[in-house]
Image (cartoon, rainbow, N blue to C red):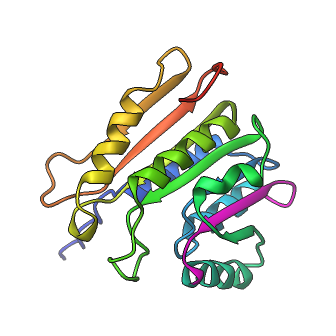
Amino acid sequence: MKQPAKRQLGVLDLAHRWLREHISAGDLCIDATVGRGNDTKLLCELTGDTGSVIGFDIQQEAIDSAAALLAENGLRAELHCESHAEMEKYAKAGTVCCAVFNFGWLPRGSHEIYTHADSSIAALKAALRLLRPGGSLVLCIYYGGANGFTERDALNAYLAALDSRFYTVLQCSFPNRTGCPPYAVFVTKDSEPEAVL
């Protein structure tokens, strides 16, 4: 009997493994790009009743979709239909365990609406200021298609320039896959820098 083919390991598998290993009950986490709410749901499950999750998306469709998914599962998060670059209005510096980003477009939504380098890098800077030492950023970077490569290249340049005295940056890509396979980047804040540039 023929065995069914195993599903390929994907960028979200890597991201979710990281989240499960680095988030505990009681933590404060941010979903910077809520999308359909799957990451938000996982963050709520990991932080538990004693933790909290704050989510952002510029599309009301995404916020509504995520809110419905959370309600179906008896979970709650603080959701804002607002740019992720505004996250510092809702959390204090040094308090966040993890911030999750999916750069690109809304799953099953219009590919004509997507993240842009200027607000994405502003959001990364804000998230790094909010992270506590030992905290991390989890980034899934989708590119190609309507949004092209401009944001990807800007994100890569920004992350490569982070001071290695304070941050560790790990990029996980799939070089043997065709097309424009999304990839994951994990950033840990090893100690508190004087400023986030």
Residue that sits furthest to the front in the current view: 118
How far across and down, in percent of the image, does residue 178 sit? Answer: 12, 58
Q: Which residues are magenta?
A: 48-60
Magenta residue check for 84: no
Residue drawn at the location 50% of the way across and 35% of the way down? 187
Quadrant of residue 192 in the image? top right
> Which residue is at a point 73% across and 59% down the rendered structure image?
53
What residue is at 46 percent from the left and 59 percent from the top? Answer: 102
In this rendering, position of residue 167 left or right of residue 149: right
User: Is residue 194 depicted above or below 32 in this figure?
Assistant: above
Q: Quadrant of the N terminus?
A: bottom left
Residue extending furthest toward the top: 165
Q: Is residue 62 left or right of residue 156?
A: right
Q: Is residue 127 above or below residue 84?
A: above
Relative height, residue 138 to residue 157 (above, below):
below
The x, y position of residue 31, in whole percent, is: 61, 59
Q: Quadrant of residue 98?
A: top right
Q: How many marks?
A: 0
Image location of residue 45, percent across then percent down = 71, 62
Residue 57 drawn in magenta = yes
Taking depth in this image into account, of 130 and 26 the one nearest to the observer is 130
Q: Residue at x 61, y 43 (%)?
A: 127
Q: Position of residue 107 (x, y in %)?
A: 41, 76
- Quarter occupied by residue 97: top right
Q: Nearer the viewer, residue 112 or 191?
A: 112
For this orientation, the residue located farthest to the right is 50
**Nearer-the-camera pick, 7 or 149:** 149
